[in-house]
Every structure is written in C-alpha cells, then in structure tokens.
Image (cartoon, grey):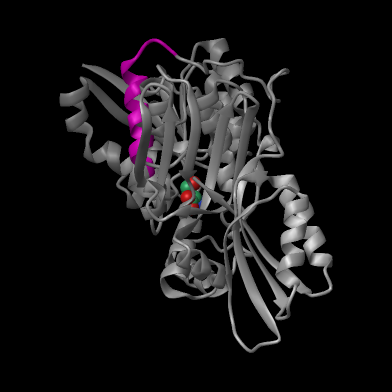
Amino acid sequence: MKTVGVAILGLGVVGSGTYKILRDHREFYKQTQGVDLSVECVLEINKQKALDLGIEESKVSDNIAEIVSNPNVDIVVEVIGGVEPARSFVLAALHSGKSVVTSNKELFCKHWHELERAAKRTNAGLFFEASCVGGVPIIRTLIDGMQANVITNLTGIINGTTNYILTRMAREGSNYADILKDAQALGYAEANPAADVEGYDATYKLSILSSLAFHTKVPLDKIYREGIADLKTCDIAYGNELGYTLKLLAIGKNGKDGIEVRVHPAFIRKDHPLASVNDSFNAVYLKGDSVGDIMLYGRGAGDLPTGSAIVSDVIYAATHNDVKYATFKNTQQAEKGVKFITDFRSRYFIRFTAKDKAGVLAKVAGIFAKYNISIIDLIQKGEDCENIPIILITHETSEFSVRRALEKIGELEDVVSVDSMIRVEG
Ligand code: HSE
C-alpha cells in the first residue's frame, strides 16, 4: 500500500483536530482509501503540545527548512493562520514540490494568485477546502458538484461568531456589548473580535467563494463590508414583528449588469432557509441555472469540523495524480472588463425618530417619492410621547438613492435622528 507522508504546520485548535483525525482514522483510511496517511512531522514551537497529543519528540520541529526538505513528506498542511509567516512557509513547501493543504482564508484570498503560480511551477497540489465554512464542503461543491451550472447567486452565513451573537441578541433581547462579552468568555468570540464582528473574516471567505462561483477573480477591495457592532436590539425586535430575522450575510450575485459582492447585516424573511441557521452554525445558499436552489449547512469552525475539511483535502491530494488549479485567470486584481456593481439594489428597513406632530410623515414620504423609493410597510411606535420611532420597509431600490434620501430626511426639522438602515434580502 502506498504511504503518503504528511507534515502539519501549527498545532493550534485546527492543527490538533487534524492530527487527531489522521491518527484515529489511519486504519479506516487504509481500508477505505487504499492509502496509509502517516504524519511524519509537525512544526510547533511549543513541544509540549505535540507530546500531549502523543506525537514522538523526534517528529517535532521548529524549523520549516527541515520539514520542506524531508523526503518522507509529500503533503504540507498549513494551519498557522494570518499572512506571515504562513505565506513564506507555504511558498517554501510548494517550491519543494510538496502539495499544500491550507485552512488559511486570509492568506488564500490575498495571495491565491501567487501561491497558485508557485504550485504550477512544481506541479504541486494546492487545496483550501478548510479556508471557507469549516467542515461544510463548499469548495468541493463549487469546484466539482456545481460545474454544470451558471451560478447567479451565492448567499451565506459564513461567520459563526457573528451568527452566534445575533442569534442570542434575538432570542434574549440583550444588547450587542453584553452578548459579545459572554461569547468571549465562552470561547465563541476572540479576545480581539474585530476580524469577525467587523465582517473581515466573511469578506475573505466571500472573495474565495465568489471567485470560484463566478469564474473570475473577486478581490477583497471589490467587496462592500459592514459589521454587526452598531446593530441595535430594538431593530431585531421590530424586524421580528414584521416577519424578518437579522443575519450577517455574505452575498454574491452575478447578473447581466455585472457582479455584486457584499457582507453586511440583512433581514431575511423568517421562512427563508437561511433564517433557521442559528447559533454558531454556517450555511451557504446557491442558485444554479440547472440545479436551481441548494443549501449546504454545518459547522463553520472548530477542531474536528475544520480538521474534517483538511483531511478530506489530504485524502484527495494523496489519491489523485492530476492537479487542478483555478478554472479562471487567477490574477491579483479583478480582470479587466469584469464589471462590479457598487450601486446595488435591495429593499431597506429604515428607522428614524421624529416629533409626533401632523405632517411629518407626509414630508418624509415626499422625500422618498423624490428619490423614487416606494414604501411597503410602515409602523409607528409609542403614544403620547414627544418623539416617536417610525419604522418602514421599502420596495427594492438603489443603495445610493436610499442614502441620499436618508440624508435629506435627517435634515428635516421635525426628524430628530435617522437611526438605522438595514438591507432586506430575498
Ligand atoms: N472566526 C470564524 C467564524 C472561524 O466565527 O466563523 C472560522 O473562519
């Protein structure tokens, strides 16, 4: 039986999970895959971590050169995270002709073109299933399962931390700051939560997923981004009354006018399949011209779920001789001639506070009419107060028109403040 040597760079949460899966399933893979996957070495400064997992001391190294020159290593698994030193280590492995499996979305979305060029030079494999949506096999679905289709829409809940926070805000009616603190204490959010709550993590993943879905490079700088830190619990409750659930969505659309890619909080109808994706779960909803709608759902993070995605790539690399690279021209920037839409269209949930007097709504409606924005639903809250919140939902309209209209509404004498503008999808 063929033995394939694996090196794991980094024994953090994902590296340890990957090691455990490879260790505990070694016999199973021999039987089911016809290949013996042997962890030959690990790169880890903290030797004790490796010893605790039962890895022999002789297999632990703190020197990448030693690992990439080891003739027994065929596949290098990079689970360090961040751009450097991961980028240099991955390039060193590819230069040595080793196939690379990575879970590193930031590295991959920023340097995919560079890594792929290096891989092509030595005919090495480059696999990244674990970079997006953890254990959910979305990359393989896009690369293989959906290739028959023109994909027009990819909408996902692809960040578990923010989904956990929003689910609890909705369930408990507590505010963002309190839930975040609790999520940090429970290990659902990092001590520095910026990458998740400001939407960066989701934009990294959307860049990779939409590039694959739309067969062209979708660089980070084309993705509109808004996080969840400014969301107010009362808006979740108002949305709920109107039949909506609030999620941080990653949205990619590909139509005749171009591509639009954005990450922001959005209301979706409660009967939309994504509305029931709760807690730290992730899901991706795809629309293909032949298959119609499909949805993949599962754990987007964690040692074993992410390890599952990594090991499936390791198995693929160990059992396939043909190497497959991106089906599109893998460039650093967007390809010339590909149009990205910035003035996208959506429906909008708007909340503003106004003086409770006759004629205010007429003035607001007048401004909406001037910008050709039509209102579907309107609720006015509070009685016998000087200032009252007014909530409305618009028909589909352009982003720029709504922003301009809200600026004008904010200038009205009887409008105290424009408080929220949340897009409504689906
Ligand atoms: N921080 C990420 C999330 C984990 O919350 O989904 C995997 O990218």
Image height of 22 relative to 278, above or below: above
Total labels drawn: 0
Q: Residue at x 57, y 20 (%)?
A: 116
On the image, the x and y values in percent for residue 79 come to: 48, 40
Image height of 66 relative to 342, above or below: above
Instruction: Please tell me whether the stretch drawn in magenta is mainly helix, strand or loop.
Output: helix
On the image, the x and y values in percent for residue 187 come to: 44, 63
User: Which is nearer the eye, 371 or 108?
Assistant: 371
Quarter placement of the N terminus: top left
Res 337 visible: yes
Residue at the limit of the structure toward the bottom, as seen here: 384
Picture quarter containing residue 334? top right
- For this view, does 31 lie left or right of residue 122? left
Q: Which residues are magenta?
A: 306-323
Residue at the limit of the structure toward the left, as seen here: 31
On the image, the x and y values in percent for residue 45 come to: 51, 47
User: Which is nearer the eye, 245 or 60?
Assistant: 245
Q: Residue at x 50, y 26 (%)?
A: 213
